[in-house]
Amino acid sequence: MSSNVTAVSYAPKLSLPDVQRLRASLTGAGASIDAETRAGDGRFEVYTADCGWEPGTTADLAELRRAAAGAIEGVDTAIVPAGLRNAGRKFLIMDVDSTLIQQEVIELLAAHAGKREEVAAVTEAAMRGELDFAQSLHARVAVLAGLPAGVVDSVRAEVKLSDGAADLVAAFKAAGHVVAVVSGGFNQILQPIAEDLGLDYWIANELEIVDGALTGKVLGDVIDRAAKEKYLREWAAAEGVPMEHTIAVGDGANDLDMLGAAGIGVAFNAKPAVRAVADAAINMPYLDAVRYIAGV
């Protein structure tokens, strides 16, 4: 049987019994293990197993994913089609707030208006999918009205990339792949980050600034979950990358559509509703684990 999926397990520590349990789960679900590797960089360890698996139906692949996910408590396992891992050109698209970067920018801005806790509560509800994203964004941005435009520079200085984010982007770019980000945050914060990382595509909302102050409004259409999927499809098509060779990464309900549309959708330290439907989950603070899932 030829190899057609790869199981990728990752955790701060992987023991031999962990690997043995994963092997048993995979073979019990009907896969044959053709080749295995282990790697580690001092922060986390990765085990990969190339598996023979009849492509079958989506339900078959879901069954294999369920078997792998339940194999080892505290260890995440992604089941990745070999076609994606072996693709000569791939397209990676990521959310920004709490994914590419560690913070939620709207909360950093709201802190300057003395409204951080109020805005954080709305952000959490929106990320869980309990509120319409566009409506919640307008409500949160409204509290910023009157802040001097200089707060944008102050907030930009507070932003920190997620651990491994720069390495992830550099690895994809060095291998000739395409990297994009799409954000429900703000262009004024994202632009210098995108330029520094050398991203191929990026887009976010635009804060309205008039006479040197924030008006509490955003310009144009809000980047919501439908827009994120739209840009994934448009940009991948522009690059000639088929959707089955795309990887999407995000953490909140606003990312669900692009995670579902991509060849593999990865939940990064995500809300429970997102983890429940994503193809893979990373529950440790190292974004470059995506490299191993994608085979880069």
Image (cartoon, helix red, strand yellow):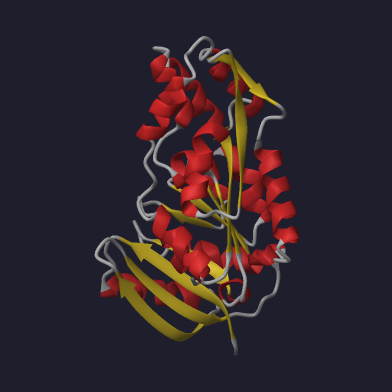
Q: In this view, does 87 lie above or below 199?
A: below
Q: Nearer the viewer, residue 175 or 274?
A: 175
Residue farthest to the bottom?
Answer: 1
Residue under the image location 51 percent in, 15 percent down: 144
Write down the quadrant of residue 166 in the picture.
bottom left
Foreground of the two, 85 or 17? 85
Q: Position of residue 156 (x, y in %)?
A: 42, 33
Seen from the viewer's position, the closer of residues 266 and 160 is 160
Residue nearest the observer in this picture, 104 or 60 = 104
- Residue at horizontal 50%, vertical 26%? 123
Q: In this view, does 54 lie above or below 131?
A: below
Does residue 160 appear anywhere in the picture?
yes
Where residue 295 appears, as percent x and y from the top left, is 50, 72
Percent from the top left, x then y, of residue 205?
62, 32
Q: Residue at 42%, 13% (x, y): give it.
A: 113
Measured along the vertical axis of the image, is residue 216 above or below residue 272? above
Does 157 appear above or below 258?
above
- Residue 128 visible in the picture: no
Q: Which residue lies furthest to the front in this view?
A: 211
> In the shown orientation, is residue 64 left or right of residue 13?
right
Image quarter (top left, top right, bottom left or bottom right) of the N terminus: bottom right
Asked if residue 159 lies left or right of residue 33, the reply is left
229 left or right of 86? right
Q: Position of residue 275 (x, y in %)?
A: 51, 48
Task: Count up the numbered dots.
Answer: 0
